[in-house]
Image (cartoon, rainbow, N blue to C red):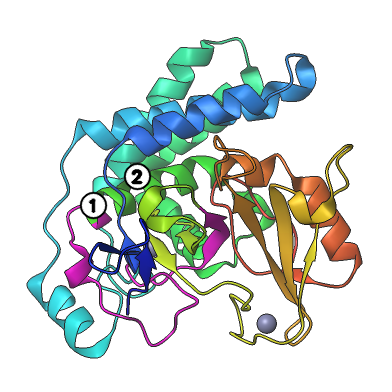
């Protein structure tokens, strides 16, 4: 149930923190592109972040290029009655529309770069050929991304296919209302599509101030989970926080921390907008890989994927 927050000291003006916040529009991809740009160092070391900025701009264009097909009434009924995610990514067949999104993203990124980057052109050319004549290979990569079992051969196409899936699923999620998305039996996966979150985000929106939301890695839905609780095993004891030292800032004051759990030995990052209002859970996640290394060395395993980044060997 939503938790009441008293906003102005009176009891008759209660604002409810929403339980679920569905994605609204393409703006989130544009904002993310701007964030990748802002985070990218100006020299060659920023090339990968700038590439992802282009990918996010392409996502925004693809998002606006077509409308979502309707979500079957049965899926919404199952969600309301049985708490199943209405867009369950693991079991619901995908419409080929996601491949049209993929084509748009490839075209836009190729147009941005021209022929200046031969490695990139080779990767894009290969995916384009698969779109024409071997769609089942792309569907298989998509299945593996969703199942979290990607293979080394998927690494080059991973960010493009991950990006297209995000566009397709967030556009579908935007057609639902919070009432369509039931309280899930498993609060640690997305109530809309069943995927794991990339990270936690503590927002500064007035109606969500200081509440923790898990941000879906696939459909961009955000859902509330109480703070100081493991987002994997739901235990409250054994929760700790780790951060990379930043000069002039106390560890507890860091905008980015890893929430670690000693019960299941996992972690997920938590981003605090109050410390950095521009923070973006997907872009800032990839800008803080040093934190992943630090936490990994201490023996915690990461639980949430970032669909713009091939996670490497398991
Ligand atoms: Zn989702
Ligand atoms: Zn745990």
Q: Nearer the viewer, mark 2 or mark 1?
A: 1
Residue under circle 2?
167
Q: Is residue 255 left or right of residue 130?
A: right
Q: Main secondary structure of the magenta part?
A: loop
Label ID, residue 121: none
Quarter of the picture for ligand 2? bottom right
User: Label 1: which residue?
Assistant: 174
Q: Examine the rendered structure and indicate whether residue 267 appears above or below residue 254.
A: below
Q: Is residue 157 left or right of residue 269?
A: left
The range drawn in magenta is 173-202
Q: Is residue 256 visible?
A: yes
- With respect to residue 96, does 67 lie above or below? above
The residue lying at 8 percent from left, 72 percent from top is: 73
Q: Is mark 1 on a helix, strand or loop?
A: loop
Visible residue check, residue 134: no
Percent x, y of residue 68: 17, 48
Marks 2 and 1 sit apart, C-alpha to C-alpha, by 11 Å
User: In terms of depth relative to the viewer, which is nearer, 257 or 300?
Assistant: 257
Write the residue at 49% across / 63% down.
211
Which percent across, then down, holds residue 75?
Answer: 17, 75
**What's the residue at 64%, 69% (across, down)?**
303
């Amino acid at each position: 149930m939503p938790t009441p927050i008293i906003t102005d000291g009176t009891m008759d003006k209660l604002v409810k923190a929403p339980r679920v916040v569905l994605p609204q529009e393409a703006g989130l991809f544009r904002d993310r592109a701007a964030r990748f740009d802002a985070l990218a160092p100006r020299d060659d070391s920023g090339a990968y972040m700038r590439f992802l900025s282009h990918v996010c701009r392409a996502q925004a264009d693809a998002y606006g290029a077509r409308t979502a097909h309707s979500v079957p009434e049965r899926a919404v009924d199952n969600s309301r009655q049985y708490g199943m995610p209405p867009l369950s990514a693991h079991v619901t067949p995908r419409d080929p529309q996601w491949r049209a999104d993929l084509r748009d993203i490839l075209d836009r990124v190729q147009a941005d770069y021209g022929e200046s980057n031969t490695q990139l052109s080779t990767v894009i050319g290969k995916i384009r050929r698969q779109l024409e004549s071997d769609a089942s290979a792309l569907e298989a990569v998509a299945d593996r991304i969703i199942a979290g079992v990607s293979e080394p051969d998927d690494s080059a196409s991973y960010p493009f296919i991950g990006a297209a899936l995000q566009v397709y699923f967030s556009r579908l999620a935007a057609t639902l209302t919070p009432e369509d998305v039931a309280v899930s039996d498993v609060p640690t996966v997305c109530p809309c599509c069943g995927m794991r979150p990339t990270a936690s985000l503590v927002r500064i929106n007035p109606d969500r101030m200081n509440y923790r939301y898990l941000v879906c890695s696939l459909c961009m839905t955000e859902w509330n989970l109480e703070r100081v609780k493991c987002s994997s095993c739901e235990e409250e004891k054994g929760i700790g926080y780790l951060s990379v030292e930043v000069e002039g800032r106390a560890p507890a004051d860091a905008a980015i921390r890893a929430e670690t759990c000693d019960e299941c030995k996992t972690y997920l990052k938590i981003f605090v907008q109050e410390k950095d209002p521009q923070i973006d859970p997907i872009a800032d996640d990839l800008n803080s890989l040093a934190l992943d290394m630090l936490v990994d060395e201490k023996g915690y395993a990461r639980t949430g994927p970032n669909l713009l980044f091939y996670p490497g060997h398991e």
